[in-house]
Amino acid sequence: MALIELRNIFKSYFLHGKRIDVLRDVSLDIEQGELVSLIGPSGAGKSTFLHVVGTLDAPAAGTMRFEGRQVFDMNDAELAELRNRSIGFVFQSHFLLPEFTAVENVAMPALVRRADRTRAFRDARELLDRMGLGARAEHRPGELSGGESQRVALARALVLKPTLLLADEPTGNLDPATGEQIHALLREVNRDLGVTAIVVTHNEELARSMPRQLRMRDGSVRPAHPELHGAAGEGGARPTTDAPTLPDGPTPGGPPGTDDDGG
């Protein structure tokens, strides 16, 4: 059984009375322990795809199973528990709390869950050591470089030992050398910690360093190199079909322009 099973996912927004189809018939399996890159032009729907997989947004149609459970049959409390327990997020902007130190930022998700304080800080320091930031644990975000801040954000996403890590343009604000360091860390935690990871990036060279590479275009997800996987595409989306009948009103979530990459 795959960790994530997406079937016939459609996502649309209504903007100025016009329906905009962002995801079109996306069917995809992600296996436990996979490291997947997702590339595509701005506005293609990459961030929207991650929001759906991360249960931050509901599709207009289609189903998603996570560890065998039907995700969109869950109520809000169950979804919040799933996100908190099983999914870590890293975004283009690190969103660190400026008044707290690096180790406090990393420990924060565990403290919010009322985990044992001593253990939370021990785990946070171990992760910062893994990120090469042990000596910066007591520094606040304003005292860290962009790359260091993003490494702290990665450690924070991992502190609760999630099953799935979703990274949305985690190197978009970094120079190429620092960006490669972040991608190397993502490959390391995937390999050493067994965390399944989906990484959205515009950098095709870095995307090619991931074992599995997907491309999003016109709301569909396909293997980035279909010639390597046959016509149907190994693990890619099923052939696009006509969109189902969707409601006349807005679907959940804001318009695609609210995402970092324009949807």
Image (spheres, helix red, strand yellow):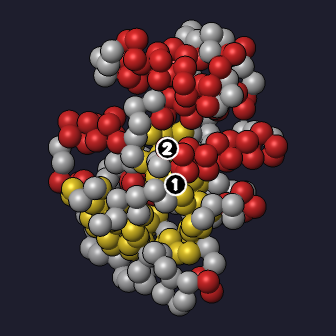
Disc assigned to residue 146: none
Residue at point 40%, 31% (across, down)? 160
Image coordinates of residue 112 in percent, x first then y, are: 35, 19
Can I make out residue 255 in this image?
Answer: no
User: In the drawing, does residue 37 fall left or right of residue 240?
Assistant: right
Q: Is residue 182 above or below residue 21?
A: above
Q: Is residue 15 above or below residue 177?
A: below
189 and 58: which is toward the camera: 189
**Residues under labels 1 and 2: Cα distance?**
15 Å
Image coordinates of residue 131 in percent, x first then y, are: 64, 31
Residue at point 58%, 12% (across, down)? 101
207 and 216: which is toward the camera: 207
* Residue extending farthest bottom: 231
Can I make out residue 208 in this image?
Answer: yes
Q: Amino acid at mark 2?
A: Leu
At label 1, counting other C-alpha atoms closer than 10 Å, the crowd grade (few under 14, some 14-19, many 20 or more) is many
Image coordinates of residue 157 in percent, x first then y, are: 49, 34
Which residue, given by chain and number where applicable, does mark 2 sit on? 193
> How many badges with numbers are in the image?
2
Residue at point 51%, 29% (across, down)? 156
146 and 113: which is toward the camera: 113
Disc assigned to residue 198: 1
Quarter of the image with the N terminus in it: bottom left
Mark 1 and mark 2 lie on one chain; the one further toward the N terminus is 2
Dot 1 and dot 2 residues touching (CB under 8 Å): no
